[in-house]
Image: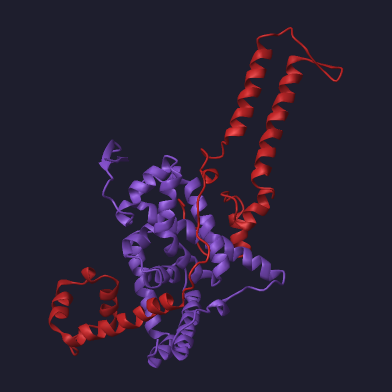
Chain colours: A red, B purple
C-alpha cells in the first residue's frame, strides 16, 4: 500500500500467498475488505495451482509396488551380526591364548608365538571385515560414493566440486 | 484390544489403543514406532501410505518412471534400515522425503557422470500419460517442461522449496523439516521463487493459453 495507490503491492500479495499470517495487521485488514486485492491473490494462486494439477494429470502410475522383507531390516550402524560374531570369536581365542603364555600353535608346520598369533588374528579380523563389506557392496568405497550407494560423505566435497548438485539434506 | 507401545514427548513408554485406527497419516508415528522395533508389517504399511507421494516426488525430479520406481524402492529400504536413526517418529514423512531428495541428488550426480562419458540422459519425453484432450495434454507437458527449466534456473534451495510447495503440495512446516531449514528461511525462498515465477516470460506465456 502506498500513498497514491490504496491497494496492496504485488510483493504483499506474494507474501500473503506464502503465509497470510505474516502480513501486518493493516494489510490483513485491507485484505478482508478489498475484493480487488483478494482477486489478485486468487489469480496468482490459480496460476500456481495449475502446476499442481498439471503434475497430477501427467504423473504415470507406478507399475511396481515396494514390498519390504525381513532381510531389508536395518543393522545397528555398520556393525553387522556376522562381523560381530567373527570379532567375538577372535577376541575369545586371543583371550584364551593370553591366559596360556607358554602355549604355541602349530599351523602348516610353522610354530607361532602368542604375539605372532595375535597379529595374525588381527589381520584375520580385518580380512573378515573387508569380506563382509565387499559382500554387501562389491564396489570399492570411492565408487560406492559415486553411485550414491554409500552413506559415507567422504568424497562429497570433491564430487560436489566436479558435479555441483546443490545441498545434501542432513539427517536423512 | 490391540495396543501399540509408543513414546510420549518425555520419552516415557505408553500404551495406546490401536484397535480402531485406520491406516491413515495419523497412524504414521505409531507405525514408525513399530517399524523401528523391527515390524516388517508396519514398515509395509508405511510404504502403502507414502509410496505414491515418494514416487511422485522422485518422478518429477528425474522424469523416468522406471528409474523413479527403482529409487522409490531404494528409499523405502533405506528407510527401514535407518529407522533407528529416526528420533522423532512424528517426522517420518519429512524424514522420508529428505531421504528421497538425497537419493534424487545422488542419481542426478551419477547421470551427470554418465553424460560426461557420452551416455544419454532420459528426460521429459517419458511424460506419456494418455489424456482425453490431446491439446490440453500437450500444453500440460509444455508447462511441466517450462517448470523444470524454471526451477533449474533458480538459485540455491529456491527451486526445491518451490517444487515441494506447488508440485509435491507440502506445507511450510513440512518443507522446513524436509530440508532441515527453519520456517522463515523456507518462506523467504518461496517468496523469491513465486516472484520469479510471476515474472518468468515462458511460464506467463503458458498461463495465457488457459487450457492447462
Q: Is residue B60 left or right of residue B18?
A: right
Above or below, comparing residue A7 to residue B63 in the picture: below
Residue B47 on image: x %, y % = 44, 55
Q: Is residue B36 visible?
A: yes
Q: Is residue B180 visible?
A: no
Please name whichever residue, A158 or A86, is drawn nearer the observer in this view of the structure: A86
* Residue projecting furthest to the top: A102
* Residue projecting furthest to the right: A109
Report the residue at 38% width, 43% height from top: B34
Above or below, comparing residue A87 to residue B137 in the picture: above
* Residue projecting furthest to the front: B1
Residue A6 on image: x %, y % = 17, 87
Task: Assign the N terminus of chain B to one quadrant of the image.
Answer: top left
Residue B210 on image: x %, y % = 37, 91
Q: Is residue A30 left or right of residue B61?
A: left
Task: Assign the C terminus of chain B to one quadrant of the image.
Answer: bottom left
Report the residue at 46% width, 86% height from top: B137
Report the residue at 41% width, 59% height from top: B50
Query: How many numbered discs sit on the rendered protein?
Result: 0
Residue A131 on image: x %, y % = 69, 38
Amino acid at each position: 500500500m502506498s500513498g497514491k495507490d490504496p491497494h496492496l503491492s504485488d510483493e504483499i500479495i506474494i507474501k500473503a500467498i506464502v503465509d497470510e499470517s505474516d502480513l501486518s495487521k493493516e494489510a490483513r485488514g485491507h485484505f478482508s475488505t478489498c475484493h480487488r486485492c483478494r482477486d489478485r491473490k486468487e489469480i496468482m494462486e490459480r496460476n500456481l495451482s495449475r502446476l499442481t494439477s498439471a503434475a497430477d494429470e501427467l504423473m504415470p502410475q507406478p507399475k511396481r509396488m515396494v514390498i519390504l522383507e525381513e532381510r531389508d531390516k536395518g543393522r545397528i550402524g555398520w556393525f553387522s551380526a556376522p562381523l560381530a560374531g567373527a570379532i567375538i570369536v577372535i577376541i575369545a581365542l586371543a583371550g584364551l591364548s593370553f591366559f596360556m603364555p607358554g602355549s604355541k600353535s602349530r599351523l602348516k608346520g610353522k610354530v607361532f608365538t602368542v604375539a605372532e598369533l595375535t597379529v595374525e588374528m588381527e589381520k584375520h579380523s580385518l580380512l573378515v571385515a573387508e569380506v563382509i563389506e565387499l559382500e554387501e557392496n562389491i564396489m570399492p568405497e570411492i565408487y560406492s560414493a559415486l553411485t550414491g550407494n554409500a552413506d559415507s560423505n567422504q568424497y562429497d566435497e570433491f564430487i560436489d566440486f566436479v558435479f555441483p548438485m546443490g545441498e545434501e539434506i542432513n539427517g536423512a | 484390544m490391540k495396543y501399540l507401545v509408543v513414546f510420549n514427548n518425555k520419552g516415557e513408554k505408553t500404551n495406546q489403543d490401536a484397535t480402531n485406527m485406520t491406516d491413515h497419516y495419523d497412524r504414521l508415528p505409531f507405525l514408525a514406532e513399530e517399524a523401528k522395533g523391527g515390524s516388517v508389517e508396519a514398515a509395509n504399511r508405511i510404504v502403502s501410505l507414502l509410496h505414491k507421494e515418494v514416487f511422485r516426488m522422485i518422478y518429477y525430479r528425474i522424469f523416468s518412471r522406471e528409474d523413479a520406481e527403482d529409487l522409490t524402492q531404494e528409499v523405502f529400504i533405506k528407510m527401514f534400515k535407518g529407522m533407528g536413526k529416526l528420533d522423532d517418529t512424528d517426522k517420518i514423512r519429512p524424514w522420508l522425503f529428505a531421504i528421497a531428495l538425497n537419493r534424487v541428488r545422488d542419481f542426478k550426480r551419477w547421470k551427470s557422470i554418465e553424460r560426461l562419458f557420452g551416455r544419454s540422459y532420459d528426460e521429459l519425453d517419458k511424460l506419456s500419460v494418455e489424456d482425453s484432450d490431446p491439446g490440453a495434454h500437450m500444453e500440460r507437458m509444455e508447462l511441466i517442461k517450462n517448470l523444470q527449466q524454471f526451477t533449474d534456473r533458480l538459485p540455491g534451495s529456491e527451486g526445491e522449496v518451490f517444487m515441494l510447495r506447488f508440485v509435491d503440495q507440502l506445507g511450510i512446516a513440512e518443507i522446513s523439516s524436509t530440508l532441515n531449514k527453519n520456517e522463515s528461511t523456507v518462506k523467504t525462498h518461496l517468496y523469491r521463487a513465486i516472484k520469479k515465477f510471476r515474472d518468468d516470460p515462458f511460464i506467463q506465456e503458458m498461463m495465457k493459453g488457459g487450457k492447462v
